[in-house]
Image (spheres, coloured by chain):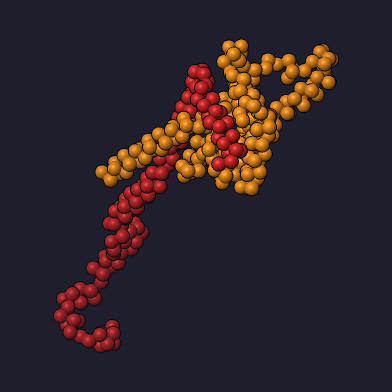
Chain colours: A orange, B red
């Protein structure tokens, strides 16, 4: 009887936890995707990165207090984006080496020849207003740390401490990166957003 | 609020709105990714739940074995004055037979009251 009660309490608790995790992931997934897409300019890879982030998060941090979930999730996302950038640069170096060593197609660069997925199609392109495109381009061109600080503070709404936890740096560094990002964006966007 | 704060707030809100304007295909893929993560979490919880009962099951098994051994050993532990080996039983029976054949033994049985009355030291002297 007691074991049955304990079992039902455990089942109820597990169900609550699943629901809480579902709500959390549903809340962050779209902004996480936008963050990854702006950072790497490739929607397919951005989706893969968000999916991988979700899996790693539930494996490692589902037991952590819920108020820690958001910075931890975005910390994993940041690491995955960084890994993607590193992998990309390794791929580029590797293909460049193959291209130099290969005699079949001299001067051929597979990366440059690959279809550019980050460019939206004509319909999507038409739907984007100039201001939005300018904004996303400007954010995408920010240095990585400034971009992270800006996205986490201004878009995700994390405070300085949570942003520092997500970025793995000090509060002072967050303030500095954020200040520079806002300054750069204001200068870059000019008339669109003043 | 400074100009910079207002600017950041406006830009941040626009980027949040943009995140909510994702196309159906992307939303669907995000939903599938989330469901996969939740399935993984659920199976992780079930596994850890069954593991949590493992010590209880092991303790119950040990208790059952201990009780079984305790009950099984009860009669064996009672004192048993009888010889337990075949050799010992043969020796005891032979001694009993010898006593029965001994003439002194018959005399002792016939005069049992006298030998009981006789003090031990005199008995030793007489023997």
Q: Nearer the viewer, residue B50 or B126?
A: B50
**Residue A28, image x, y percentages:** 50, 32
Residue drawn where x is 37% and y is 35% of the image: A15
Report whether residue A52 is seen.
no
**Residue B96, image x, y percentages:** 26, 66
Residue A88, quarter of the rendered image: top right
**Residue A58, image x, y percentages:** 50, 36
A104 horizontally vs B18: left or right: right
Residue drawn where x is 33% and y is 49% of the image: B64
Residue drawn where x is 37% and y is 47% of the image: B56
A136 horizontally vs B26: left or right: right
Is B110 situated above or below A109? below
Report whether residue A88 is seen.
yes
Q: Nearer the viewer, residue A165 or B87?
A: A165
**Residue B19, image x, y percentages:** 53, 26
Q: How many marks?
A: 0
Q: Quadrant of the N terminus of chain A?
A: top left
Residue drawn where x is 41% and y is 44% of the image: B52
Q: Nearer the viewer, residue A20 or A34?
A: A34
Is A107 situated above or below A155? above
Q: Quadrant of the C terminus of chain A?
A: top right
Is B52 situated above or below A46? below
Is A165 situated above or below A136? below
């Amino acid at each position: 009887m007691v074991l049955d009660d304990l079992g039902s309490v455990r089942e109820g608790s597990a169900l609550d936890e699943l629901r809480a995790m579902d709500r959390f992931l549903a809340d962050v997934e779209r902004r996480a995707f936008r963050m990854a897409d702006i950072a790497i300019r490739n929607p397919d890879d951005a989706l893969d990165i968000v999916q991988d982030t979700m899996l790693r998060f539930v494996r490692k941090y589902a037991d952590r207090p819920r108020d820690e979930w958001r910075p931890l999730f975005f910390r994993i996302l940041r690491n995955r984006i960084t890994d993607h950038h590193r992998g990309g640069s390794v791929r580029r170096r590797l293909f460049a080496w193959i291209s130099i060593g290969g005699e079949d197609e001299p001067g051929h660069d597979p990366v440059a020849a690959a279809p550019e997925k980050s460019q939206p199609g004509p319909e999507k392109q038409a739907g984007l207003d100039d201001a939005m495109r300018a904004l996303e381009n400007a954010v995408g061109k920010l240095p990585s740390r400034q971009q992270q600080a800006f996205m986490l503070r201004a878009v995700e709404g994390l405070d300085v401490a949570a942003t520092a936890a997500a970025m793995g740096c000090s509060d002072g560094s967050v303030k500095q990166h954020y200040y520079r990002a806002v300054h750069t964006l204001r200068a870059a966007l000019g008339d669109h957003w003043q | 609020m400074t100009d910079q704060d207002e600017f950041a707030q406006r830009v941040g809100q626009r980027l949040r709105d943009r995140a909510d304007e994702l196309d159906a295909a992307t939303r669907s893929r995000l939903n599938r990714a989330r469901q996969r993560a939740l399935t993984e979490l659920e199976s992780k919880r079930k596994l850890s739940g069954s593991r949590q009962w493992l010590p209880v099951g092991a303790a119950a098994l040990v208790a059952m074995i201990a009780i079984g051994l305790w009950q099984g050993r009860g009669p064996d532990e009672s004192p048993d004055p009888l010889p337990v080996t075949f050799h010992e039983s043969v020796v005891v029976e032979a001694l009993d037979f010898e006593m029965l054949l001994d003439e002194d033994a018959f005399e002792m049985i016939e005069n049992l009251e006298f030998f009981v009355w006789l003090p031990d030291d005199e008995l030793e002297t007489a023997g």
